[in-house]
């Protein structure tokens, strides 16, 4: 979640899920339109909202990639070697397709 401030008498702090943001406009105040159709007027500039979203997404990806590198490789089950490779299946299907033409 990113932290923003509602425009008003007191700049009220709130957290927003960036995945809900559809548009950010300056009219002259910054208006964020959510995918739900809700509009929120905030203190931050559109550029600042963009920076916050970019940092949030970067952090999410960094955490995901870090966890992925730390995890051991998955152990293959005994049946995994019995199954044909996907390329072998695709190759046989494509040759069958050509013979029917």
Image (tube, rainbow, N blue to C red):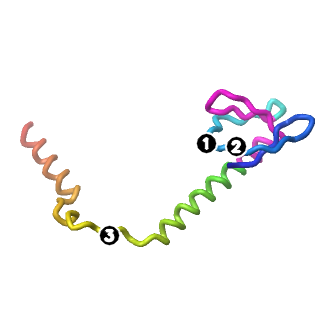
Position of residue 19 measured from the top left corner of the image (x, y, whole percent): 61, 42
Q: CA distance from mark 3 to mark 2?
A: 39 Å
Above-or-below relation of 45 to 82: above
The crowding category of the residue bearing disc 2, from other C-alpha atoms within 10 Å (few below 14, some 14 to 19, many at least 20), is some
Residue under the point 91% across and 39% down: 10
26 sits left or right of 64 in the view = right
Mark 1 and mark 3 lie on one chain; the one further toward the N terminus is 1
Q: Which mark, by number, is residue 75?
A: 3
The residue where tag 2 is placed is 16
Above-or-below relation of 8 to 44: above
Name the secondary structure under disc 2: strand
Name the image quarter holding residue 36. Answer: top right
Residue under the point 65% across and 44% down: 18
Name the secondary structure under disc 1: helix
Residue under the point 69% across and 28% down: 38
Q: CA distance from mark 1 to mark 3?
A: 34 Å
Task: Please give the range of residues in magenta.
Answer: 30-50
For the residues labelled 2 and 1, say whether their Cβ atoms are less than 8 Å apart.
Answer: no
The crowding category of the residue bearing disc 1, from other C-alpha atoms within 10 Å (few below 14, some 14 to 19, many at least 20), is few
Residue furthest out toward the right:
9
Position of residue 4 measured from the top left corner of the image (x, y, whole percent): 78, 45
Position of residue 71 measured from the top left corner of the image (x, y, whole percent): 46, 70
For the residues labelled 3 and 2, say whether their Cβ atoms are less than 8 Å apart.
Answer: no
28 sits left or right of 88 in the view = right
Judged by depth in the image, the label closer to the viewer, 2 or 1, is 2
The residue where tag 1 is placed is 19
């Amino acid at each position: 979640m990113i932290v923003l401030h509602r425009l008003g008498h007191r700049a009220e702090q709130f957290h927003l899920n960036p995945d809900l943001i559809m548009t950010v406009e300056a009219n002259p105040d910054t208006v964020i339109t959510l995918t739900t159709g809700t509009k929120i007027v905030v203190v931050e500039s559109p550029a600042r909202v963009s920076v916050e979203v970019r940092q949030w997404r970067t952090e999410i990806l960094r955490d995901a990639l870090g966890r992925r590198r730390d995890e051991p490789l998955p152990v293959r089950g005994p049946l995994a070697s019995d199954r044909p490779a996907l390329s072998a299946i695709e190759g046989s299907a494509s040759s069958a397709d050509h013979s029917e033409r």
